[in-house]
Image (cartoon, coloured by chain):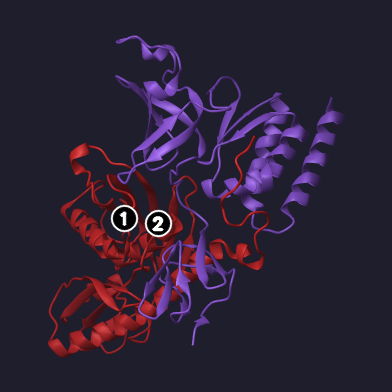
Amino acid sequence: MAELLVPDKSIVVPGEEVAAGMDFLPTEGIYRDGEKLVASRLGLLVVDGRLVKLIPLSGKYLPKRGDVIVGKVIDVAISGWRIDINSAYTAMLSMKEATAEFIARGADLTRYFTFGDYIVTKIVNVTSQNLVDITMKGPGLRKLSEGMIVTVAPNKVPRIIGKQGSMVSMIKDATGCKIIVGQNGVVWLQGEPEQELLAVTTLRKIESESHISGLTDRIKAFLDEEMKKLQAGK
Amino acid sequence: MGYDKRIDGRRPDELRPIVAKAGVIKRADGSAMFKIGNTVAYAAVYGPRDLFPRFLQDPQRGTLRCRYNMMPFSGAGDRVKPGGSRRSKEISMVTEKALLPVLNLEDFPNAVVDVFIELPQTDAGTRCAGICAAAIALADAGLSMKDLVSSVSVGKVGDMIAIDLDYAEESYEGVDVADIPLAFIPRTGQITLLQMDGLIDRDSLKKALEMGRKACLQIYGIQKKALKDRFASAAAVNGNGNSDGSGDKNE
């Protein structure tokens, strides 16, 4: 009765019927229309027992509570800062969440964060109207100075980080750069110029090859070789 | 002087050759090229993003904004005056209405999705090519959609009912010509665009719509393929690492 209409792990497009029968349950990116399950996004189909879901291959970052992200200050308001988080919406950092210091009424807020500053921050709440509240209170949350910012596709972030952060630690170890990967696809890195450049190239490589198996080994080999070249050049 | 054989030798129910490609504009969030005969449409999607001025925002759902533009030397005839015109404004509006039924914009209140359709070369059927390109581009942008939208023009030249008229047919002199652009949601068969230029009788219209529906299914196949080809290599292999997308936080 219940059957899959397309093979597991195949690419589906919006409107494509992926399964028939009531035994399958639609989850993320899939909707039910009568007896049929239909894809509602462009993505990779994953069947997990009775659950059918879709891993998106493109799309903007959707803010989620608890995500650690990298954002940019775009406006200084009366009682806080507006932060661009590389999403459809901007986030609000309130004075209370920004610092433990006492800020007098009418103080100049640009003393703390000013236009163009990049910060590592954490999402505390997302409302139904997609108003995003963020905080600076937590380990590792801070203002970023020096270094460079690159933007990657938000849906590749899990690959860049790797299992338990294995991938990003590997790049850190090999290049000696400090790297912070925001869940929103904004990456901050700091190190020697050549090594920064190598780290960026590596990120781009992961981004474009993330779907081909054996990624970790390939990236490791690539990093070893490139570092050897750098050392030889010196 | 009748019209019993098509100028370019096609069968009445034959489409012009179609080429479709997704992801052609790097800086856009989603993009596509759709070429049908000598008509070429590019669509670029930006967003969802903040919508200003604020009074245009809709707190219930996201807004779709389309812009249709024919480039100055795109046609075979006179130079098109650059910038908007009455015609382009109307087509922008019908494009928007043709695409809106398939989009799920409820997740993006107060935001806007911008669709820019540019036509560097035209030979009739531009709004249809634009809609086809825009549908691919919207899917490429990762938006949640019920289905794609496929579009083609049908018509009647003299006594011949035909699909996908080109400019020479559309402006054929000496006989009555009806030109009917339409758009379908292929899965459900619902019509999202139906306009007409000229005169046609009821029976011919029915027949023309049926031919259009078949042609749209053909176009749908091409649109689907364009999207799949963009990520073709991803299908051959499965994910490495945590495929559930959760990902561990670094540090």
Identify the chain of the residue marked 2, using the numbered disc in the image: B
- Asked if marks 2 and 1 touch (Cβ < 8 Å), the reply is yes
| Closer to the camera in the image, B118 or A40 | A40
Q: Secondary structure at mark 1?
A: loop
**Mark 1 surroundings: few (<14), some (14-19) or many (≥20) residues within 10 A:** many
Left or right position of A159 against A32: right
Q: Secondary structure at mark 2?
A: loop
Position in image of residue A126 (x %, y %): 38, 41
Any mark on residue B143, and which?
2
> How far apart, in angstroms, are the residues tagged by discs 2 and 1?
8 Å
With respect to residue B223, does A234 lie above or below?
A: above
| Closer to the camera in the image, B61 or B135 | B61
Residue in the picture at 78% in, 40% down: A223
Residue in the picture at 45% in, 58% down: B140
Where residue A65 sits, quadrant-wise, is: top left
Q: Residue at label 1?
A: B105
| Quadrant of the rendering where the C terminus of chain A is positioned | top right
Identify the chain of the residue marked 1, using the numbered disc in the image: B
Q: Colour of chain A?
A: purple
Q: Amino acid at mark 2?
A: Leu
Instruction: Confirm whether residue B106 shows in the render.
Output: yes
Q: Amino acid at mark 1?
A: Leu
Q: Colour of chain B?
A: red
| Closer to the camera in the image, B214 or A3 | A3
Position in image of residue B185 (x %, y %): 32, 73
Position in image of residue A131 (x %, y %): 33, 39
**Mark 2 surroundings: few (<14), some (14-19) or many (≥20) residues within 10 A:** many
Q: How many numbered tags mark residues here?
A: 2
Left or right position of B32 against B104: right
